[in-house]
Amino acid sequence: MVANQCKGGLKVGYRFGNDVCFCYNPIMTPVNFTSRRSPVYSRRGIVATSQPLATAAGIEVLSKGGNAADAAVAAAAALNVTEPTSTGIGGDMFALYFDAQTKQVTALNGSGRAPSALTLERLKREGLLADSLPFYHPHTVTVPGACAGWCDLIEKHGSLSMSDILAPAIRLADEGFPVAPLTAHFWARGADRQLKSALNGHELTIDGRAPKAGEIFSNKGLAKTFKLVAEQGAIGFYQGLVAESIVAVIKEAGGCLSAEDLASHVSTWESPISVDYRGLRVYECPPNGQGITALIALNILEGFDLASLDLLSPEKMHVMIEAIRLAFADAKWYVSDPAFAKIPMKELLSKEYASERRKLIDLKRATVDPQRGSPVNSSGTVYLSVVDGMGNACSFINSNYMGFGTGIVPKGWGFTLQNRGHNFSLDPNHPNVLAPGKRPYHTIIPAMVTRVADNSLYASYGVMGGFMQPQGHVQVLSALKDAGLDPQSALDLPRFCLDADSAGGKVDIEEGMPIETVNTLREMGHPLNEVSGYERAVFGRGQVILRDESGVLCGGSDPRADGYAGSL
């Protein structure tokens, strides 16, 4: 890396062999990280996903006259084909949609509910009433909400038919596709962890093994599922042959999801929650999602002059870690299904409350509280972002949870069933306690950002990865707003992730974080764990699209995944 001073700030160059690329930032000082890609610019539309073929599917739909909602669903379906290690129609989805004409943001909750026959009493009779359900148990299967969410998003905001939207994914599934490298790695992990023992899990393998990088994999069963949805809409999934197969395989596995649970499922359109952060309004979906965690943390951080601190300095990392830890202390207790528990969202998101919480941060020492508020690491999600040429934006997230979810496959249909029910508390006094027909604490969260001054679109973005997601939202937005980085550079920055799987509230630190920062954080009392290689997946995988006042789009895609930001 090389650096040159220039008027107003520092010009920082990152060396690739004999080449040096420069980005300008008015507050940066030299840091030890490599910006691996250039941001993508366009005026007609950008699609950013974790898989090149899914990005291409979204671009294809935009080129046919589709808008941001159409392209988002097309990309989500293609991701089910090309990255079943993370996402699928057997999981859930959430979306935020920015309408360029009205400048309004709408929130769609496409998450499913617990089976009507699943109670704490039943778990007790079956000897399962411990701290939580086993990871891949059939009782962790909640109603898959993704399909209804896709259809509802298109009905409200889309412009094309589901047949046109699902065509690229059907083609990929029917004809086969070459598997991407990182996906192949995590597919192999899932094949060994879930698919080898789950009912019909072999359908997502090649003779019991995962496909290798570059190897062609086709999924005729999933193509058949998508064709039914293209022809019949959501009813083709929640009733009829697909639904019968879901119920049958869950019953065979020992679960209790019923045909009535599937047939009665509905998505919900909700008012998004938001806070102002330095002239920007940041939107998240309300609980049962955990987006409120990011908003609480941003409210706390607004009281610190982060722009005056070096990009990856220990001082900046310390206050961000502490703010996120405080945010989780609240979110891990209050986030639940609002149909079952009263959530004081107005109070949690008030500036006055943030001011009181901010006082708890010691600028010299870490405050580690592993008893409450530290997240548990787990993932199995894809996040994608689309902004079309008209300025409509769709921030979209879809997930199985824990990779392939349960790994259970309805026979012949080519998708796994999620294990979101693992996030229920089994403590009868907890707001997020398991109950029939209840939605669990949900980790997947999309984000949308507008300018307070005129409500214009600033960014459609998100970071997938279990409980890393609100942490990623905060870190990436701070890089964009406080440090002035472009989307790609903001995504390339090394990250931290609070991890409560180990005693003492361990903080994972990604390779590339300056050694001075790592040493100082340790001295301040943060229990750090340095992470490199494939394990960097713990830090999530994000997509960012910015839109400036003239309508120019700028997109970036996370280097921790296989994908890219593509332009029309």
Image (cartoon, helix red, strand yellow):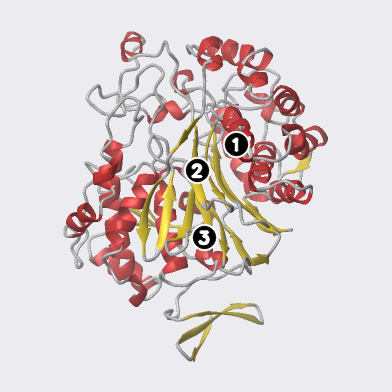
Q: Amino acid at mark 3?
A: Ser
For residue 183, what is the image quadrant? top right
Q: Amino acid at mark 2?
A: Thr
Q: Does residue 408 appear in the picture of this structure?
A: yes
Q: Where 162 falls versus 313 (above or below)?
A: above
Q: Does residue 540 appear in the picture of this structure?
A: no
**Circle 1/circle 2 CB separation < 8 Å:** yes
Q: Position of residue 316 (x, y in %)?
A: 32, 68
The residue that disc 2 covers is: 106
114 or 139: which is nearer to us?
114
334 or 456: which is nearer to us?
456
Q: Position of residue 179 (x, y in %)?
A: 72, 44
The residue that disc 1 covers is: 156
For residue 344, what is the image quadrant? top left
The residue that disc 3 covers is: 456
Residue sitting at 80 percent across and 32 percent down?
174
Q: How busy is the neighbourhood of tag 1: few (under 14 within 10 Å), some, or many (20 plus)?
A: few
Q: Where 65 falls versus 414 (above or below)?
A: below
